[in-house]
């Protein structure tokens, strides 16, 4: 588990555990709680500003009042529009100015983020689902890879944690397992597999610090692995959600017209935008106001390890104890973990 110790030391944290950025669930209090407890919470700027109502700079300063431990920032760098790209560049600059030094990029070429972050002494990890995107990310200069597997919530990959690790292990950079971890045993298993850290999302929605509606948290605690299904009807590509009557009625596959529009170079961007606008609204409403018949909840197969809503510190203490025990069993000195 040396890779895990090295990752924790490099990022400046005590436990190699990341609270992944989540729309709409990444409120400042949740991000701060995970970092304060020894891991690292990731700021999701769209959630910060458009769901939880904080100016980004002020939201980061709120987090800083709650903890002085490292936090990260999620930069979605797709070129959906010039306005969006300019806004993301501004947000990255604000995060750097406010002392953030760990960045997670996704959905585009991370080169410009890498250039700006490296100039300030920071690290950039890039979301990938296979070797093709991993190699493109490395061409952009990223320091490590967030390996999104088939057990993840939201936009999941299509490989198991084991298969994805084996495909990427020779690339020579730290790999973070993202997807399917809800229990301490799964956490330790991924680190013993060779991953440098684990990113979790679903587990942290079912916490007292997360401002998601109680309906969302209850759905996660009630769900089993078999209740997580993939549907194309939300964003045009497979998304992992909890099976509900609405999702079953909606169907899991795009219809022939939607597929045609998604495949056509002239219409695919407009179609994706239409999907995104609808799903962003539905997710925000369901997260903050509870479920009605047209709502859905994103979640991964880690629901099998989530049975109750708990404080972040309680969860982190269990994971820290499991991490320390695994180190002791391997006759390796564990990274200092706060009680």
Image (spheres, rainbow, N blue to C red):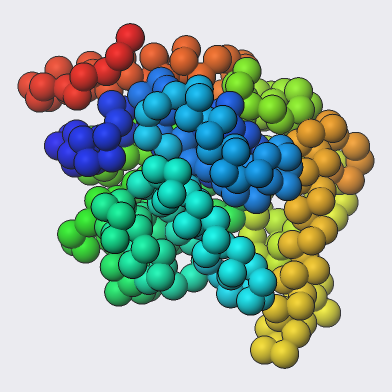
Vertical position of residue 325 compared to residue 160: above or below: above
Viewer-side residue, 247 vs 11 = 11
Q: Position of residue 160 (x, y in %)?
A: 41, 51
Viewer-side residue, 228 vs 91 = 91
The image quadrant of residue 236 is bottom right
Quarter of the figure that contains the C terminus: top left
Residue at image position (42%, 51%) is: 96
Residue at image position (73%, 47%) is: 50
Residue at image position (76%, 23%) is: 214
Q: Residue furthest right?
A: 293
Left or right? Give the position of 61 relative to 333.
right
Quarter of the figure that contains the N terminus: top left
The image quadrant of residue 79 is bottom right
Visible residue check, residue 199: no
Q: Position of residue 68 (x, y in %)?
A: 40, 26
Residue at image position (72%, 71%) is: 272
Q: Position of residue 38 (x, y in %)?
A: 36, 24
Visible residue check, residue 36: yes
Q: Residue furthest top?
A: 339
Left or right? Give the position of 330 relative to 264.
left
Left or right? Give the position of 297 relative to 109.
right
């Amino acid at each position: 588990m040396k890779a895990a110790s090295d990752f924790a030391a490099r990022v400046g944290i005590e436990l190699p555990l990341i609270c992944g950025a989540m729309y709409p669930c990444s409120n400042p209090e949740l991000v701060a709680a995970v970092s304060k407890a020894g891991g690292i919470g990731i700021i999701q700027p769209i959630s910060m500003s458009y769901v939880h109502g904080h100016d980004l700079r002020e939201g980061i300063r709120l987090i800083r009042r709650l903890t002085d431990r490292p936090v990260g920032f999620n930069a979605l760098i797709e070129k959906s529009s010039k306005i969006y790209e300019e806004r993301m560049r501004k947000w990255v600059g604000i995060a750097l100015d406010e002392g953030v030094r760990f960045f997670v990029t996704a959905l585009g070429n991370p080169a410009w983020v890498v250039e700006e972050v490296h100039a300030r002494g920071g690290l950039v990890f890039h979301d990938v689902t296979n070797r093709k995107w991993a190699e493109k990310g490395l061409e952009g200069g990223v320091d490590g890879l967030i390996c999104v597997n088939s057990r993840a919530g939201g936009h999941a990959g299509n490989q198991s944690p084991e298969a994805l690790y084996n495909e990427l292990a020779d690339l020579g950079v730290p790999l973070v397992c993202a997807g399917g971890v809800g229990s301490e045993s799964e956490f330790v298993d991924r680190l013993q597999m060779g991953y440098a850290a684990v990113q979790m999302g679903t587990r942290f929605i079912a916490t007292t610090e997360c401002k998601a509606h109680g309906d969302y948290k209850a759905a996660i605690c009630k769900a089993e692995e078999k209740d997580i299904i993939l549907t194309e009807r939300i964003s045009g590509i497979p998304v992992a959600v909890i099976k509900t009557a609405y999702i079953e009625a909606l169907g899991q596959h795009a219809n022939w017209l939607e597929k045609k529009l998604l495949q056509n170079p002239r219409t695919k961007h407009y179609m994706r935008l239409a999907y995104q606008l609808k799903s962003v609204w539905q997710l925000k409403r369901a997260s903050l106001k509870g479920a009605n018949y047209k709502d859905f909840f994103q979640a991964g197969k880690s629901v099998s390890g989530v049975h109750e809503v708990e404080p972040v510190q309680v969860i982190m203490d269990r994971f820290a104890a499991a991490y320390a025990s695994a180190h002791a069993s391997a006759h390796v000195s564990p990274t200092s973990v706060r009680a």
